Image (cartoon, grey):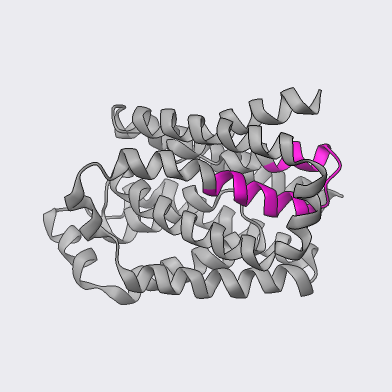
Amino acid sequence: MILVILPLLALIAGFLNGIGASGGVLMMSGLIISGLSPIEASALNKICALFGSIGALKTFFKDKSLLKTIKPSSIIFSIIGAIIGAISALIINNQFLGRLFSILITGFFIFDLTKKFWLKPTTSKVMHNYNQDRIYSSSISFFSGIYNGVFGPGTLTLSMIPFQVIFGLSVLESLRIATVLNTTTNLTAAIIFSKETIPAISTSFLILFIAMIANLIGQTLGSKFATKVNNNLALAISYFSIIGLILTLIIKYWLN
């Protein structure tokens, strides 16, 4: 049964990640239900997402000019953040971190929902600010790395929102940047979690391999879908995913 369910979840999760939604919540839930510990589930989820992101990156960066939007400083700070986050996940009380992130995510979600009432319409100058300002972009990348190292699910969606709010980037533009950062931090955290990952891989290699292929297919299809749909539709899907993430955090860290 697990051999069928987990690859299916990986396919759906990959598609959601491909369009900028939170597929990790779905994948993590399935891995934990299958009997893995939270750290093992987090590590394997990152491996699946890492492999699956290859398809999304290939689709997003067919236009070589888009590579200019990825800043080396952002990648470096995302790696540093992921190292701090992953180590914290191993030594700090998970319940405290889970409650803290549930509060921060809820607050930022409310902030993004209400920004249209007070935020001035974006212009072409905003994108210029993104190209020039390394402090904000590096800070976003750093905290994105910390969150992905500690928890993981929802990192892609949560990374997109600051790029839209602060720099005025479109959903698709922010999705491209967030996908690169998410891939980098997934790899970093997976390496740090390797002690917990290797035993889990050795006992369920076939399931993991099939899930990785399914996630690759899902992210490839999702990224192609994201390049064609209206920004509002992609944004709506992302919002529903964040709501699901918030509910997951509340149930796991406040109600249990």
Question: Which quarter shows the N terminus?
Answer: top right
Q: Report the residue at 33% width, 43% height from top.
A: 171
- The answer to whether residue 226 is above or below residue 44 is above
Left or right position of 151 against 253: left
Q: Which residues are magenta?
A: 28-50
Q: Quadrant of residue 13?
A: top right
Q: Main secondary structure of the magenta part?
A: helix
Q: Report the residue at 82% width, 38% height from top.
A: 33
**Residue placed most toward the observer, 72 or 200:** 200
The outermost residue toward the left is 124
- The answer to whether residue 81 is above or below residue 119 is below
| Total number of numbered discs in the rendering | 0
Q: Report the residue at 32% width, 38% height from top.
A: 59
Q: Please check the rendered image and state whether residue 1 is part of the magenta-colored stretch, yes or no.
A: no
Left or right position of 196 against 45: right
**Residue placed most toward the observer, 51 or 171:** 51
Q: Position of residue 129 (x, y in %)?
A: 19, 67
- The answer to whether residue 144 is above or below residue 116 is below
Q: Is residue 253 visible?
A: no
Left or right position of 236 against 4: left
Q: Position of residue 123 (x, y in %)?
A: 14, 53
Q: Is residue 248 visible?
A: yes
Q: Position of residue 181 (x, y in %)?
A: 43, 59
- The answer to whether residue 120 is above or below residue 93 is above
Q: Please check the rendered image and state whether residue 46 is part of the magenta-colored stretch, yes or no.
A: yes
Q: Position of residue 67 (x, y in %)?
A: 24, 55
Q: Report the residue at 50% width, 36% height from top.
A: 216
